[in-house]
Amino acid sequence: MDSHQFASAIDQICEEKGISREKVLETIEVAIAAAYKKDFGHKGQNIRAVFDLATGGVKIFQVKQVLDESMVKTEEEIEAERLAAEAARERGEEIREAREDEAEGEKKVRFNEEKHIMIEDAKKIEKKIKVGEELLIGLESKTDFGRIAAQTAKQVIIQRIREAERETIFEEYKDKEGQVVSGIVQRIERGAVFVDIGKTAGVLFPEEQIQGERYRLGQRLRVLILEVQKEVRGPNIILSRAHSKMLAKLFELEVPEIASGAVQIKAIAREAGSRSKIAVAATEPGVDPIGSCVGQKGTRVQAIINELGGEKIDIIEWNEDIAKFIANALAPAKVLSVETNKEQKVAKVEVPEDQLSLAIGKRGQNVRLAAKLSEWKIDVAGGKVEGGEEEEGEKNNEGVKEHEGEIKTDKKDEGIAEKEEAKPKGKRGRKKKAEA
């Protein structure tokens, strides 16, 4: 293979694996050095190869560290070290402690001709060399490697490229942590869903799945990259669909005003798969935060509801006045009054008697989400509506919209239907004629 074909092969590896060209060349040099040492080197030698891609030539060097007398252990120190090691073996567990002490405090090395060279001898080869530097001594290049050496080089290349690929994937997805990506369900094992998200697969554990949601092979869905962990076998990417950040990122993708910063998400309270409350505020004058999130005819919020399998979403307008904000957070219930205790962060909320169950919600869900959204403890009590208090309650709930992804029947139509049903009917649904 000529140098042009070799360069093309390297470029192909770089493109397929997403590895830099310098990393691949470094891998090839390490592999050549390993093969050379296998066939022509000696035990303890530090061999380095330099590969020239333009010419296809290889230069082989033996690397030696330059030392002076203060960096080399004396015979007495070596003997004392041997005796200490023998005593440590007899004591068993204390061997590790002796090694730790050596690693922390010992800077001297045992001189090895294959690895080290004294400064006096090093200056005879290279005059400007200094203590602690590496001296490269040229060796005769060889091309007739044996089968075992070639196999060694192959294994080194495969291992190094895999390591480089894992490192590249880790760095790429570490930067995407906290973002929503699209993926395809690859396999399902013991409740965990493995999702192909591009160059690798992430895992969606049962606790990060939306309750009641079912997945099938080949299904495309959006997931949040919750955490990227570095493991020996490659990066471990944990995905989520139940995290509150998933909801925030979906709004950011669907609502341009949130992406640009004109509308800001202040707080989110979510019970995945059931109901969520999201508080938004405008940072620019003239911008309707709730209208921006809802979209024309509810298209924006409906797209998010569909993505989350019909999860109900209440969009609340943020208010610095905690009393007004708590009143908004209890939507769709109307609020008569709110008494706050700032020291204990407790709010006592009064709602009309007929709105009490609505304010509390099914199994306490509505008030629970409102408390989570406001980070205040909320006590709800029923009260009588007198005079204009009902209108006041309506004002407290201004700037609140609830979206459940359901078509609601008009109240007037409901009233008409009730009147029709109340009238007596015959067996075929016809109205009975008045008896003469």
Image (cartoon, rainbow, N blue to C red):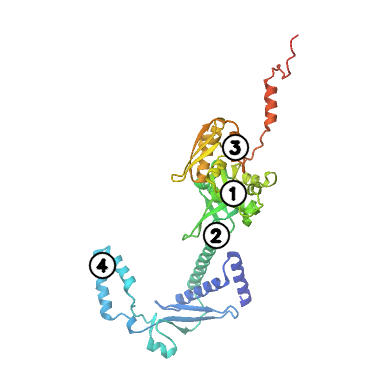
Q: Which mark is residue 392?
A: 3
Percent from the top left, x then y, of residue 366? 54, 38
Percent from the top left, x then y, of residue 43? 39, 76
Let me know if residue 398 appears in the view.
yes
Percent from the top left, x then y, of residue 361? 54, 35
Q: Look at the numbered disc 1 and give the secondary structure of its residue.
A: strand
Q: Look at the numbered disc 2 and give the secondary structure of its residue.
A: helix
Circle nearer the N terminus (2, 4): 4
Q: CA distance from mark 2 to mark 4?
A: 46 Å
Give the amino acid type for the residue marked by disc 4 in the picture.
Ala
Query: Would you name the residue on which mark 2 appears?
Result: 173
Q: Quadrant of the C terminus?
A: top right
Q: Are marks 2 and 4 in contact (CB under 8 Å)?
A: no
Single out the mark in the foreground, 4 or 1: 1
Single out the mark in the foreground, 4 or 3: 3
Give the amino acid type for the residue marked by disc 1 in the picture.
Val
Q: Look at the numbered disc 4 and give the secondary structure of its residue.
A: helix
Give the amino acid type for the residue marked by disc 2 in the picture.
Tyr
Q: Residues within 10 Å of mark 1 (few under 14, many from 20)?
A: many
Circle nearer the N terminus (3, 2): 2
Circle nearer the N terminus (4, 3): 4
Q: CA distance from mark 2 to mark 1?
A: 29 Å
Single out the mark in the foreground, 3 or 2: 3
Q: CA distance from mark 3 to mark 2?
A: 51 Å
Query: Would you name the residue on which mark 1 appears?
Result: 280
Single out the mark in the foreground, 3 or 1: 3
Query: Would you name the residue on which mark 4 appears?
Result: 88
Let me know if residue 183 appears in the view.
no
Q: CA distance from mark 3 to mark 1?
A: 23 Å
Q: Residues within 10 Å of mark 2 (few under 14, many from 20)?
A: many
Percent from the top left, x then y, of residue 91? 24, 64
Residue for point 25% across, 79% down: 76
